[in-house]
Image (tube, grey):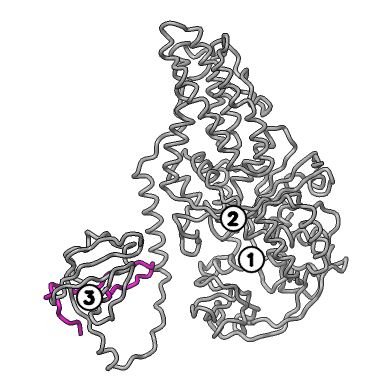
Amino acid sequence: MEKKFRRTMVTAALPYANGPVHIGHLAGVYVPADIYVRYLRLKGEDVVFVGGSDEHGVPITIKAKKEGVTPQDIVDRYHKIIKESFEGLGISFDVYSRTTSKIHAKTASDFFKKLYDKGEFVEKTTMQYYDEEAHQFLADRYIVGTCPHCGNTRAYGDQCEACGTSLNATDLIDPKSAITGNVPVLRETKHWYLPLDKWEPRLRQWILEEHKEWRPNVYGQCKSWLDLGLQPRAVSRDLDWGVPVPVEGAEGKVLYVWFDAPIGYISNTKELLPDDWEKYWKDKDSRIVHFIGKDNIVFHCIIFPAMLMAEGSYQLPDNVPANEFLNLEGDKISTSRNWAVWLNEYLEDLPGKQDVLRYVLTANAPETRDNDFTWKDFQARNNNELVAILGNFVNRTLVLTHKYFDGIVPACGELTDYDRASLNEFADVKATLEKYLDTFRFRDAQKEAMNLARIGNKYLADTEPWKLAKTDMARVATILNLSLQITANLAIAFEPFLPFMSKKLRTILGMHEFSWNALGSVDILSAGATIGQPELLFEKIGDEVVEAQVKKLVDMKRANALANFEPKPVAAPVAFDEFMKMDIRVGTVLECEKVKKADKLLKFRIDDGMGGRTIVSGIAKFYNPEDLVGKQVCFVANFEPRKLKGIESQGMILSAENADGSLVVIGPQGPVVPGCQVG
């Protein structure tokens, strides 16, 4: 039998304060967390929603050094942006604090000290890179070198961002300090480690046996980690930015950010509820739910629980509904490449459209697998669902009520069989929504809420009260009463998902008090009550709006690529005689068309001065075929013919790869007779 809890502590992953939040963060963590919290509040449950900025760690110090400011300057700037952005989108934290607060420093320090005093850590001395000029040990991100896997010369000591391979700093070829550019040396340093292997049996029992209801992606990742065998993990590092390690002999060492950050949930709760915080974290009648992205599963399901087990007085999380990743326009969201939709910019560019973003991100929520956000889908869901279904039904109902009853809720008369059948379609809406929301299936829950609007639209279209107004106003009164009751249901059902729309609609309907328990009933609005003037809940979004957003993305990506462009290493030398074997000619494009069932290929018919030839080239992503007709291009004329998609290609058109990955066809600057050689 499922245990009933008296209260719920909901946490949302602490966003890293070295940049704004983007739609990937929102879809993965913050929108689903807010939906769940708003739902619990509507039910009248005792719930606390905790968030805050993660403000320690190496990336912040790197950004500060680049900008010539202090780490505190960086986190102050982005904490403000992030906090205001969340407020703008209606993410309803009870507290949104930060890990540079005094209360956090004390909480994290006390947590470490308790584990230290209990003998829960293992001390280890290891060899780490040290910059002799900067007089400091180098964190992995402060070491750059050549990736041994792909040859990228700007790989970091923990990962190569070019090929995605995880690295150790000692794996790099020709490592250099990112601070001074010097070659670092290896030196001994002492750190404290949490022996995760000690807690592996208990973690295995707790997760694999006691929490089989967790999402498959979460359960599966945990099982993989446990099956590989857990190893001790350092809880301290050599750095001057963070919470100092509170023991003797630890000068110049701070708590590792992965140890420090999750304690932020506790310290932020202390800040909110200085006298009552413990009951949410330590009482057996309290449950803890962590909302995170999949890159944080191991920290919240294995490492943080192991910390809590070692401390001994805290409850373990009841669920960790982690989402997968959201891609953008078919490409992985990347802050380093500036390929993202930033929340603060969205709120400026599309004012008043907070609920549109919430709706689209929930509809495309990557709950069990990666999903994709596109601006065209954003436009289509707004126009075809929010406007055409939800907004259309509500507006027609309100307009007809004002037209025929001067904005007074009419009394409901005798119901027909069709009325009863329509009402029966949403009689179980509350139970269905609860089934989905209680199991963190927010995408399905939102669909169910929108289905209520579909039922209303069909009911109005089928009953046609505007036709009955001349002959049977009693019937019109019944139809509009029931339509208004459905509208009131929509105001309740959508409150967790679209809080701005719900508030506006409740104001129009005069629903100053409302309850989740009323969902599914048809007596929410009393006959004789006055409703306000109709207002459009949503407006259509034109092509020019989404085209501007796509262009903004492409321009940002190109500018970032150009700013960070570094030419590839020159290939191995080629003998002059070998190069001279290549016959490069100029030709004029006579015809050009896309190759069927091949997104990247274009088929050219070239006037080569020798009777013509066909060449297939992989540049379809970068050119429209008609734009190339009449252009002169350079091509390799003496390549052996080869077949591509069944077409014999008799050469290769030359193109240059730009910094942003785009291809530019190479051609002469002035007119050249087809067939002339390039030399």
Type of secondary structure dominating the magenta stretch: loop
Is residue 258 depicted above or below 82 in this figure?
below
x and y percent of residue 311 in the render? 84, 59
Q: CA distance from mark 1 to mark 3?
A: 51 Å
Sequence-wise, which precedes: disc 3 or disc 2?
Answer: 2
Amino acid type at mark 3: Cys
- Whether residue 329 appears in this view of the structure is yes
Q: Quadrant of the N terminus?
A: top right
Query: Dot 3: few (<14), some (14–19), or many (≥20) neighbours within 10 Å?
Result: many
Q: Can you identify the residue that label 1 sits on?
A: 57
Q: Earlier in the sequence, mark 1 or mark 3?
A: 1
Query: What secondary structure is found at the residue carrying circle 3?
Result: strand
Spatial separation of the CA atoms under disc 2 and disc 1: 24 Å
Residue occupying image coordinates x 38% and y 70%: 659
Task: Return the x and y of residue 549 as percentages of the image width and height.
Answer: 39, 50
Q: Looking at the picture, which amino acid does disc 1 mark? A: Gly
Q: Which residues are magenta?
A: 652-679
- Name the residue beneath numbered marker 3: 634
Within 10 Å of the Cα at label 1, are there few (<14), some (14-19), or many (20+) other Cα atoms?
A: many
Residues marked 2 and 1 touching at CB (< 8 Å): no
Q: Work out whether residue 417 or residue 383 is closer to the camera in this orientation and state it.
A: 417
Provide the secondary structure element on which disc 1 rests: loop
Left or right of 182 on screen, residue 49:
right
Q: Secondary structure at mark 2?
A: loop
